[in-house]
Image (cartoon, rainbow, N blue to C red):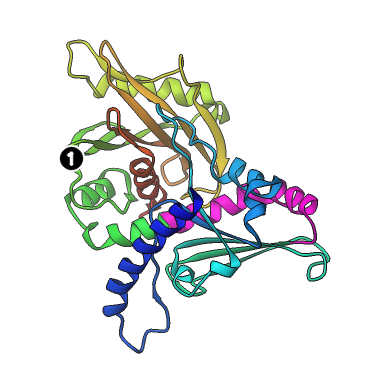
Amino acid sequence: MMRKNISGLLIVLSFVFLITSCGQKRKNTKVRSIGNTSEILVVLDSEQQWDNIVGKTIRSYFGQEQYGLPQPEPVFKLAHLTKRSFSELFKKHRNILIIQIDPKKYAIPKVETFEDLWASPQRVIHVQAPDNQSFVKLLNSRAEAIAEKYNQAERQRILSVYRPSSRNKVTDKLVKTFGLKMTIPSGFFTAKTEPGFMWVRKEANDYSQGIMVISETYKDTAQFSTASIVARTNRFLMQYVPGEADSSFMQIDQEFVVPRTKAVTGFVSDYTIEMRGLWKVEGDFMGGPFLSYTFLDPRTNHIVTLYGYVYRPSKKKCNLLRQVEAILYSTRFVD
């Protein structure tokens, strides 16, 4: 089964590499990276490692299900091969995780990260350990940081695609209304603007993506609690985001999936709360995943929530949600 997986991957990579190589100029030192969205290529010492505690630990962290999706989808899609099969072609992959376990070479476990090592854009992370036990212990403590490195790389790649078409009426209106700049590509349009609220959306053939800005006066730190963020978001959604049926409106679902929050770094503000979960339409049968980021705007003393959602019934949504995440992460203050 795994040989078929790698064989299929090799065919795809060969085709893409052939196309991208034709467009490379000789003066470029790094070729363009290849690989699917949210995919990590894991390079192991041997095939046995994928079946023992090493592979199981890798899958438990990087192959786990994305929280807040109605259907199970992994945070990252994992493909693996051994270092013997790690040819120059595979070195062009966008996200690579190299595992080396050898008591003769490595006295202590260590993690090294590289950017654009063999291709661009690219994130390569090298994990070294003297034995399986120390590898597991190291990954237990560093897996979240490693995953965030790959998340950053995916967001940057998405934004590099969106950036050329991001100067449009939607981004201009966002700057004028809230003093916030986002990399919002063409295809999005302004659906509604009200005091303290703005809704932009994209409607494609089989999916919808939306982003909302919610802003009101900051009073105290209690407004950063999960209950407060949910209540405030639901209040604006109820008022400004109607469903298709009469008297229906969007809400954060708290019955089937409890909204999960955590503090994140690297956002527009030093202190930002990320929330993930499911949205639903009260009085209708629509729903899907959402994520939001809540922070303080020190220029206006307003607490701001950036709320993004995806609607794609009965189909995969993880990559669409990652696109929304990248857009939200691009937020910057404008003087």
- Asked if 179 appears above or below 107 in the picture, the reply is above
Q: Which residue is mark 1?
A: 204
* 211 within the magenta span: no
- Comparing 146 with 163, the one in front is 146
Q: Examine the rendering and report whether any part of residue 37 can be seen.
A: yes
Name the image quarter holding residue 12: bottom left
Q: Residue at x 64, y 47 (%)?
A: 51
The image position of residue 77, as x and y in percent, is 46, 47
The quadrant where residue 197 appears: top left
Pick whichever, 71 or 145, lies toward us: 71
Region rendered in magenta: 129-154
**Neighbour tally class for label 1: few under 14, some 14-19, many 20 plus, Cα within 10 Å:** few
State yes or no: residue 139 in magenta.
Answer: yes
- Where 60 sits versus 105, above or below? above
Relative to the observer, which residue lies in front, 56 or 243? Answer: 56
Q: Residue furthest bottom?
A: 27
**Image position of 164 with respect to 310: above or below:** below
The residue depicted at 29 percent of the width and 60 percent of the height is 161
Q: Height in image: 35 above or below 71?
A: below
Q: Quadrant of the C terminus?
A: bottom left
Instruction: Find numbered disc 1 in the image and state the secondary structure of the residue it sits on.
Output: loop
Where's residue 124, x and y in %? 55, 65
* Residue type beneath disc 1: Ala
Secondary structure character of the magenta stretch overall: helix
Image side of residue 219 versus residue 59, left or right = left
Identify the residue at image location x=37%, y=40%: 321
- Residue at point 35%, 68% (across, down): 14
Question: Residue 247 appears at what percent x and percent y?
Answer: 21, 10
